[in-house]
Each structure stands twice: as structure tokens, then as C-alpha cells.
Image (cartoon, rainbow, N blue to C red):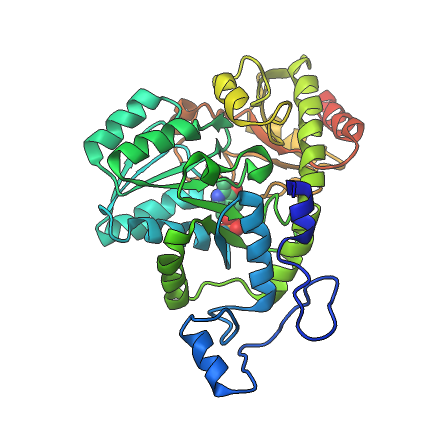
């Protein structure tokens, strides 16, 4: 089946009895039993699939896991309480029985950088950074530090650089490192890292996959060989997704391919319009033929799909002008998240990159005039009209 059909059917409609519900219901039950102890014993032993306790399994959450595993082409998935819980779980699994050292891309989601510095480093795990878009620099860092784990994002926030996953996987294979990919920005519609040889794929379900701004969740997708270690850590730590959240996420995922296709098309329109606007100094968009990673985009992404994030710089604007611009938006939502059906705008110096000094931010290319737009599924004319009137005011 194609991705569009898998999103609707994978994992759903399990038969609990002689009737079949057309969608998986919310199983709000903390534990489960069978008509005989023998069966429950075999479920506990892992000899047969089944339900025993909600920290181990839950039918609603399992349905979501099967759905996402199918989309990513993985053997299984484990849903977590948030994207951050999923990243932590994936890193711990990747480092089990490997060298306790990580080489990561330098431009990561802010909380991920904190996780590396505040949770991993104090526990004796070395953390090094190298630019995955510069494969020579990255290969040299991996060769020098011999990490057990490599961590990259498919599309890095907010400069929207695209990681050459095929090259990174090859470098990792030569050195026996496990590759963890945070693919939240790219989604399985643009790239499927497991099929390129990555080991563990992580998503914040909160963003494109659930897509409606109504649920927080995360998920790790992987191959069979990582199942025992992931399950073991997840069951011990217990940061699993609850059945209500799993239900909302699964409902959202069914329309994810439709939404994302529209969002990608809208983003192309908006990026093109912004690039020709006199008040815009610069647009960062992977669909731009001048984008520094245009060759990687052509190699890894399907034709005409570049994701739905667009970053841009407003000519000669400082914080004050940017605040005025954002305050004048009538439809685009000025809140901290991305990937929802509604368009959203974010000011990185105030939010995602607040903790970084202005000088360091400037070196990363994030000036006081920098905005990040998550393009929604509205009519593209309305998104453009809203930006146009707000740009016209200041
Ligand atoms: C949002 C996000 C996360 C964290 O996900 P939560 O669901 O908020 O915990 C991790 N990585 C990326 C790229 C994100 O956008």
C-alpha cells in the first residue's frame, strides 16, 4: 500500500470480539486479563502478543505505533509522552552496549541541546558537535571521537539546512555508530531515514503527524534488533503515551499525507512570494534552487516537496519592528509550535533560541530580523494576504 493508504488503514480496526469498530476506540484501562491465567502468563513472558499492563502496552497506543511504523517502513514503534521523551529513549537505546559518546549536529531543537548537556554529559556521556552538512568535517569528528551514537535532525531549525542522511549513515556504518534521526520537520512523506540505513527515527507527534495543535506526544521507530532494548528502557522509565493522546494522534495521522502535501505546496507559494517582496531581505527555504543543500534535497526528497517551514529576514528590522509586524497578523497564529493545520509564526530570538547570546545567534545566522513560519493548510492567498498587510504596516 502507498503511504496515503497506510495512514488510513495501518494498525486500525483490530477485532476485539465478534464485531469490529471502524476506528480504534480509547482503551481507558490500566490493566488487562484473560479468561485463563495460562494466557496472561504467556503474554507476560512475551511468547504471544497481548495486553497486561498499560505501561507495557495499550491497544489504542499499539494501534498508533503500528500506523507510524508502517509510514516510516520500520519493524515497530514505541509511543512516548512527548517528543523529548522519545529522543531520550532513542539515545539511551543507541548508547546501550556502545561507546558512551555522541556526535550531534550543532543546530538542534533547543530542548535537545539541553538534554545532551544537562542529562547525558553529567552521566559520563561525551557530547561533541559537528556540522552534518559538511561531510568532511563530520567524518573527521566521527573518526576522532568514535561515538556510539550519532544524532541529527533531517531539517534543522530554524535555518532549514537539510542533512545528507545517506552520507551520514555511511560514515556511521564505517565506525559502528548507531544513527538517531529526529525527523519531525521532514516527516515520512519527504524522507524515510530507516530505509536509508539510519537506526532509530524519532518524531514529535505534536507537530505534523498529529497536526491539529491538540496533543503532545512522541514516537521512536526502529528495526527489530532495537526492540528489546527500547522496550526494556521504556518499561523501566515509564514515559509512555496515554490512550487519549494516542487516539487523537492516530486520528490526526490519517489525514497527515493530505495535509502535508497541501502544506508543502502552500509553502512553495509563500516562499516564492516572500522572495519577491521588497521588505524581505532573505528567505530560507529548501525549495530555493540557491539553497546551500539543493543537491541533497534533489537526492533525498520527492520532486516539488520541500517541507512546509519557511524562514525569512525582514529588511532593516529590529525587535520592535518584528513585534509590530507579528502583532498585526490577523490570521497567522503567533504561537510556539509548528506543523499544525493553521499557519504559525515564531520569533526565534524570543523563543526557541532565547538562551543563546545575541552574538552566537548572529553567528548562526539568526539576526533580530529573523522569523520562522510554519505554513498551514489555509488557502495560500489568505496566508499571503495576511503577511502582505502586516509587512505593509511597519
Ligand atoms: C517539538 C520538537 C521536539 C520536541 O517535541 P515535544 O513533543 O515538544 O516534546 C523535538 N524535536 C523537534 C525538531 C521539534 O520540533
- For the point 55% across and 83% down, the residue is 34
- Quadrant of the rendered image containing residue 383: top right
Residue 304 visible to an observer of this rendering: yes
In the image, residue 158 sits, relative to residue 78, either above or below, namely: above
Compare residues 22 and 341 and report the one nearer the observer. Answer: 22
Point 40% across, 62% down: residue: 231
Residue 68: x percent and y percent?
A: 57, 50
Q: Is residue 47 above or below residue 36?
A: above
Q: How many marks?
A: 0
* Residue 116 image position (x, y, % from top left): 33, 46
Quarter of the image where one finds residue 394? top right
Horizontal and vertical percent position of residue 93: 34, 53
The residue at the point 53 percent across, 23 percent down is: 297
| Residue sitting nearer the eye, 267 or 39 | 39
- Image location (x, y in percent) of residue 55: 47, 70
Quadrant of image for the N terminus: top right
Amino acid at each position: 500500500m502507498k503511504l496515503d493508504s497506510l495512514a488510513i488503514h495501518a494498525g486500525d480496526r483490530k477485532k476485539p470480539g465478534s464485531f469490529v469498530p471502524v476506528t480504534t476506540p480509547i482503551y481507558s484501562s490500566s490493566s488487562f486479563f484473560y479468561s485463563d491465567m495460562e494466557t496472561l502468563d504467556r503474554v507476560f513472558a512475551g511468547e504471544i502478543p497481548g495486553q497486561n499492563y498499560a505501561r507495557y502496552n495499550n491497544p489504542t497506543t499499539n494501534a498508533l505505533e503500528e500506523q507510524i511504523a508502517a509510514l516510516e517502513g520500520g519493524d515497530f514503534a514505541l509511543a512516548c509522552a512527548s517528543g523529548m521523551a522519545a529522543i531520550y529513549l532513542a539515545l539511551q537505546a543507541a548508547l546501550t552496549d556502545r561507546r558512551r559518546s555522541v556526535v550531534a549536529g550543532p543546530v538542534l531543537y533547543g530542548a535537545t541541546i539541553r538534554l545532551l548537556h544537562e542529562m547525558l554529559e553529567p552521566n559520563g556521556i561525551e557530547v561533541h558537535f559537528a556540522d552534518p552538512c559538511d561531510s568532511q568535517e563530520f567524518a573527521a569528528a566521527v573518526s576522532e571521537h568514535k561515538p556510539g551514537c550519532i544524532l541529527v535532525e533531517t531539517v534543522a531549525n530554524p535555518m532549514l539546512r537539510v542533512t545528507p542522511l545517506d552520507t551520514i549513515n555511511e560514515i556511521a556504518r564505517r565506525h559502528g555508530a548507531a544513527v538517531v534521526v529526529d525527523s519531525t520537520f521532514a516527516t515520512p512523506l519527504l524522507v524515510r531515514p530507516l530505509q536509508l540505513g539510519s537506526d532509530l527515527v524519532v518524531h514529535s507527534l505534536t507537530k505534523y503527524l498529529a497536526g491539529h495543535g491538540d496533543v503532545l506526544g512522541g514516537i521512536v521507530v526502529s528495526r527489530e534488533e532495537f526492540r528489546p532494548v527500547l522496550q526494556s528502557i521504556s518499561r523501566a522509565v515509564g514515559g509512555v503515551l496515554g490512550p487519549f493522546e494516542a487516539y487523537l494522534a492516530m486520528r490526526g495521522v490519517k489525514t497527515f499525507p493530505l495535509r502535508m502535501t497541501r502544506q508543502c505546496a502552500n509553502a512553495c507559494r509563500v516562499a516564492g512570494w516572500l522572495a519577491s517582496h521588497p521588505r524581505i531581505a532573505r528567505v530560507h527555504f529548501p525549495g530555493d534552487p540557491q539553497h546551500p543543500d539543493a543537491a541533497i534535497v534533489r537526492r533525498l526528497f520527492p520532486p516539488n516537496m520541500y517541507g512546509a517551514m519557511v524562514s525569512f529576514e525582514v529588511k532593516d528590522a529590529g525587535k520592535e519592528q518584528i513585534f509590530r509586524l507579528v502583532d498585526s497578523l490577523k490570521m497567522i497564529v503567533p504561537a510556539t509550535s509548528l506543523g499544525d493545520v493553521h499557519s504559525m509564526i515564531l520569533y526565534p530570538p524570543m523563543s526557541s533560541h532565547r538562551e543563546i547570546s545575541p552574538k552566537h545567534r548572529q553567528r548562526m545566522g539568526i539576526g533580530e530580523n529573523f522569523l520562522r513560519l510554519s505554513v498551514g493548510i489555509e488557502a495560500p492567498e489568505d496566508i499571503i494576504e495576511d503577511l502582505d498587510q502586516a509587512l505593509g504596516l511597519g
